Image (cartoon, grey):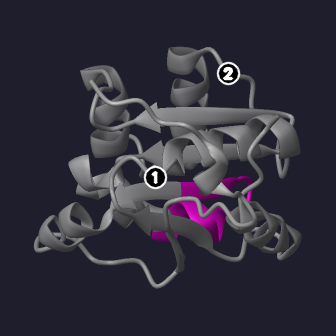
């Protein structure tokens, strides 16, 4: 059984809006942000690019540092480096742990304005607030908060728990 998250429906609404903003998914650590956005990319798009800024190569970071002046080249480099074919208006870029590389978050303004692809960013609340002093926060972000899953209708009292 797959756990359905309410936030997925909000992602679908955002996608219907057609790339007018990036989606910034915030919340506590380990609530499933990365898992949910990856599932969204895999299910709702022809392809998706997943960049985990807490663990990505220097080559990818250099594309952000040096390649944003020419977006055609930027997309080409990302596609080659990550081995993902991009489809205009049918590919999703996921910037996971975006607080680890604030310049990627700042780039959202230009990437959204370009209009070729959709963008979702994830980050934990505390880290996002502390890593923004040297960047321009993009107004093209729509922030949604993710909470831990709630289980309603489960009768926990019927389970036997043994302690050691």
Distance (Cα) linking label 2 and label 1: 27 Å
Q: Residue at x 37, y 28 (%)?
A: 60
Residue 31: x %, y % from top left: 46, 52
Position of 161 compared to 59: left or right? right
Residue 62: x %, y % from top left: 28, 32
Q: Is residue 45 visible?
A: no
The correct choice, above or below, for 152 with respect to 20 in the image is above
Q: Is residue 93 visible?
A: yes
Nearer to us: label 2 or label 1? 1
Is 143 or 149 nearer to us in this picture? 149
Residue 84: x %, y % from top left: 67, 21
The correct choice, above or below, for 112 with respect to 88 in the image is below
Disc assigned to residue 31: 1
Position of 35 compared to 67: left or right? right
Q: Which residues are magenta?
A: 109-120
Is 22 or 85 nearer to us in this picture? 22
Instruction: Find residue 133 and report its image quarter.
Output: bottom left
Element at badge 2? loop
Is 48 or 97 nearer to us in this picture? 97
Residue 114, magenta (yes or no): yes
């Amino acid at each position: 059984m797959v756990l359905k998250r309410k936030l997925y429906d909000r992602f679908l609404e955002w996608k219907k809006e057609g790339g007018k903003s990036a989606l910034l998914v915030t919340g506590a650590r380990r609530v499933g942000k990365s898992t949910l956005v990856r599932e969204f990319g895999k299910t709702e798009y022809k392809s998706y690019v997943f960049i985990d800024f807490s663990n990505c190569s220097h080559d990818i970071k250099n594309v952000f540092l040096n390649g944003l002046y020419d977006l055609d080249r930027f997309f080409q480099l990302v596609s080659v480096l990550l081995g993902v074919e991009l489809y205009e208006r049918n590919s999703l870029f996921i910037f996971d742990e975006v607080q680890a590389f604030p310049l990627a978050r700042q780039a959202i303004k230009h990437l959204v304005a370009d209009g070729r692809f959709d963008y979702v960013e994830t980050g934990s609340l505390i880290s996002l607030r502390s890593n923004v002093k040297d960047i321009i926060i993009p107004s093209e972000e729509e922030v949604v908060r993710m909470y831990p899953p709630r289980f309603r209708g489960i009768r926990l009292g019927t389970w036997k728990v043994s302690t050691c």
